[in-house]
Image (cartoon, grey):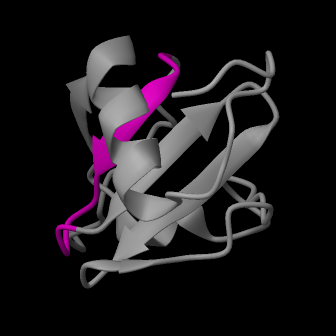
Amino acid sequence: MRDQAMPMVEPEISGFYLDRDGDIWERRNEGWRLILQRGVAVDPEALWDWAEGHVRDYAPFTLVHGDAYAARMAAVAFPTARPQDGTSP
């Protein structure tokens, strides 16, 4: 019998995740955003798909925290970005 890896299941909870390399991703309903890769901010507009965008290749993912952590990570990664509601961070 051949050893077969279990398929990785996409996390359902929106939030920030660490991948197997320690990079930070944001899970949204629209898709995945790579936030920090090797400690460097990545394009905030690019969305990746779990299967077609090969996000699953970086699994397993560990949920980091909720909204407070998300706001902090966004401020660190994209200091000039503004929240979608137009308020200042």
Residue closer to the observer: 33 or 61? 33
In the picture provided, is 32 more to the left or to the right than 72? right
Res 39 quadrant in image: bottom left
Query: Which quarter of the rendered picture does the N terminus lie within?
Result: bottom left
Span colored in magenta? 13-22
- Residue 69, percent from left and from top: 27, 27
Residue 83 in the image: above or below residue 82: above
Residue 58 visible (yes or no): yes
Residue 27 drawn in magenta: no
- Residue 78, percent from left and from top: 53, 60
- Residue 41, percent from left and from top: 46, 75
Residue closer to the observer: 26 or 82? 82
Identify the main secondary structure in magenta: loop
Residue closer to the observer: 17 or 78? 78
Residue 52 in the image: above or below residue 42: above
Res 38 quadrant in image: bottom left
Q: Residue at image x 67%, y 74%? A: 43
- Residue 22, percent from left and from top: 17, 67
In the picture provided, is 42 more to the left or to the right than 64? right
Residue 68 in the image: above or below residue 5: above
Residue 16 in the image: above or below residue 53: above
Q: Residue at image x 34%, y 58%? A: 24
In the picture provided, is 64 more to the left or to the right than 31? left
